[in-house]
Image (tube, rainbow, N blue to C red):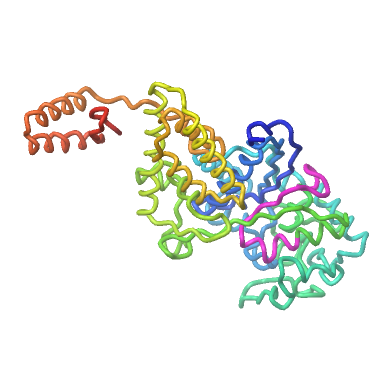
Amino acid sequence: MSLRQAQGKLGKVGMYTCGMTVYDYAHIGHGRKYVMDDLLRRMLSYQGYEVTHVQNVTDVGHLVSDADEGEDKMEKGARKSGKTVWEVAAMYTRDFYESMDLLNILRPTIVCKATEHIEEQIKLIKRLSDKGFAYETEEAVYFDVSKFPRYESLFGQRLEEKQTAVREGVQTGELKKNSLDFALWFKATGRFAKHVMVWDSPWGKGFPGWHIECSAMGMKYLGESFDIHTGGLEHQGVHHPNEIAQAEAVTGKPLAKYWVHSGFLTVEGQKMAKSVGNVYRVQDVIAKGFSPMALRYLYLTAQYRGPLNFTWSGLAAAQTADEKLATFVRDSRSSKRVELSKEKMKKLDGFRDRFWEAVNDDLGFPQGLAVMWEMIKSNIPDYDKADLLLDWDEVLGLKLAQTEAVVIPSEVTDLAAKREQMRKLGKFVEADQLRLEVEKFGFKIKDTPMGTKIYK
């Protein structure tokens, strides 16, 4: 049975993806993670699953360090921008989804903000407290990791490996029973006495910790145990183990059956940092003349769990590849369709099977792209190759079906016609000069067996 034939015959999938902490702009490193989430969702939908995709917006409670150190990132962003925390949250949430739209990432089925789910988080903390997994101090309510024996085994790390050194001059919880205990609720006292975002709770005014929000909202919308939870590799060490511990302590069930972690993106071999000046947004990529689809294509060239090094030359190569695909689809779809021989039909089916086998094997999109280019170079008629490309693009998300015919100015067509005359007369130097004139208009001329073609 083909993947297409299976559509509509499979079950439902609950998928939770860790969203942005909206205190700053989204960058291309975020873009890589969310494109990977999008590819996974598209794969499942294509194969016939009904996917409920839940994504949080962290707009309170995420401190500068994952280990309860420092100030709330939202308040840091507000102080830096001169806006209120609520204005900052609204501005960067809007920027995040606009950036993801540019990358053709499907909007989640449900977007849930931490600040709009305080009641759910308080209820979950109360359940933890009632079961003896939480304790209260003067500054916060903490989860006691010693009461959850499986904590050490989460993601294969020993407790001593997870110890987080306290940096000099950074405030942190001094009243924890264990250094790895994590905050479920911060009280609006002491270092957080002036915290702007506060709510009433059984432990006094305060605000939730970062980890509790994902468990509370994931369980609210997907149930106590759901299918897939995604995040970045940076979540493996602290955030996701904490999510698992607090959720499973209450329910006794696995929070998620599958955990998917996307790898890091570096820029020219360096970690992205504002001090280095290499933190780029999708809008920066566009400003330099590149298509967002070129960036999406670049993400496809690396295995999602491994590292990806962003370079401008690499992006240029990705743009060339993406433009070739778009041009091929547009030109091929306008060609005449011919009946395939049994041999070529079998060959086409072979490419189809190999592509899906590749991408179904741990999201092997680099291998899938290799099959795709091999198929394009084959002797199968172009119309059928384009048809198959459009089918695959339902998952690749490169918007190949949306390529519009390029409007070629009359000046360009006139120059191309004169060039063709020069070539027929054997005046190749003059013909080459006319080719350069065409390129000044942003077009290229390609001589093919079917005649001269003009490309944007």
Query: Can residue 189 be seen from the camera position used here?
Result: yes
Q: Residue at x 71, y 62 (%)?
A: 192
Q: Is residue 7 above or below residue 370?
A: above
User: From the viewer's perspective, is 47 left or right of 205?
Assistant: left
Residue 40: quarter of image: top right
In percent of width and height, residue 126 lies at 88, 56
Q: Position of residue 451 (x, y in %)?
A: 24, 28
Report the magenta residues as a range: 218-242
Residue 408, image x and y in percent?
27, 25
405 lies above or below 95: above
Position of the C terminus by quadrant? top left
Whether residue 300 appears in magenta in the rendering, the answer is: no
In the image, what residue occupies the spot 49% across and 58% down? 308
Considering the image in quadrants, where does the N terminus appear? Answer: top right
From the viewer's side, name the closer residue of 388 and 87. Answer: 388
Kindly tell me whether residue 118 is visible in this rendering.
Answer: no
Q: Position of residue 186 (x, y in %)?
A: 76, 61
Q: Please count the marks in the image.
A: 0
